[in-house]
């Protein structure tokens, strides 16, 4: 089992910055089975969309709308993944979710874990 707890959301003016955190916890050894951690975003009335992901080997991926503005990183010592959000826009408003792609032997298929989400509101 993996538990994900997001924090850091809030209200910010357009052009401002926020840093979201995703604290990852679980049973001993589980971290070796985490394939990737991904931040998703859901705008009001819309479907969840990928924002940024970081692979266990360190590779990162970003959605086009956030490239150059958002940075995903991790602190392995604290088992925390961060999403640094700069130059925020009103269209970034929504709930941000942390997701873990965890794979177990022998089939190594994806098991999905989600956090509860954190609200980000960007005022114009």
Image: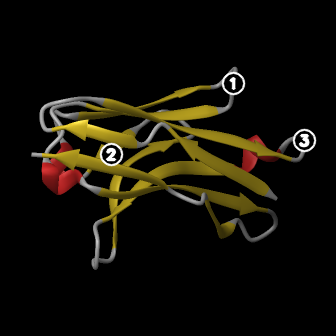
Q: Residue 14 falls in which quadrant of the image?
A: top left
Q: Quadrant of residue 106?
A: bottom right
Name the quadrant containing residue 69.
Answer: top left
Residue 42's disc number: none
Q: How many marks?
A: 3
Q: Which mark is residue 78?
A: 1
Q: Nearer the viewer, residue 123 or 26?
A: 123
Residue 67: % across, % down: 18, 41
Lower sequence index among marks 3 and 2: 3
Q: Which residue is mark 3?
A: 28
Q: In the rendered structure, find residue 61 and report the number of the disc placed on it.
A: 2
x, y percent for residue 36: 54, 49
| Dot 2: element | strand
**Is residue 72 toward the left or the right of residue 37 in the image?**
left
In the depicted structure, whether residue 1 falls above or below residue 55 = below
Residue at 81 percent of width and 47 percent of height: 30
Secondary element type, mark 1: loop
What percent of the width, then of the height, locates residue 23?
65, 39
Mark 1 crowdedness (10 Å alpha carbons): few <14, some 14-19, many ≥20: few
Q: Residues within 10 Å of mark 3 (few under 14, many from 20)?
A: few
- Name the residue at 47% across, 37% down: 8
Closer to viewer: mark 2 or mark 1: 1
Q: In x, y percent, where is residue 18?
A: 34, 32
Front-most of residues 50 and 54: 50
Q: Does label 1 or label 3 sit earlier along the sequence?
A: 3
Query: N-terminal of the two: label 2 or label 1?
Result: 2
Task: Classify 10 Å Cα crowding around label 2: few (below 14), some (14-19), many (20 and above).
Answer: some
**11 or 64: nearer the viewer:** 11
Q: Mark 2 and mark 3 in contact (Cβ < 8 Å)? A: no
């Amino acid at each position: 089992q993996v538990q994900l707890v997001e924090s850091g959301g809030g209200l910010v003016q357009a052009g401002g910055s926020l840093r979201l955190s995703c604290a990852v916890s679980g049973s001993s050894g589980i971290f070796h089975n985490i394939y990737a951690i991904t931040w998703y975003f859901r705008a009001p009335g819309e479907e969840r969309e990928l924002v940024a992901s970081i692979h266990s080997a360190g590779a990162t991926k970003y959605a086009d709308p956030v490239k150059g503005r958002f940075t995903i990183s991790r602190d392995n010592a604290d088992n925390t993944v961060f999403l640094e959000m700069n130059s925020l826009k009103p269209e970034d408003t929504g709930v941000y979710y942390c997701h873990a792609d965890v794979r177990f032997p022998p089939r190594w298929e994806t098991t999905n874990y989600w956090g509860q989400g954190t609200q980000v509101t960007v005022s114009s």
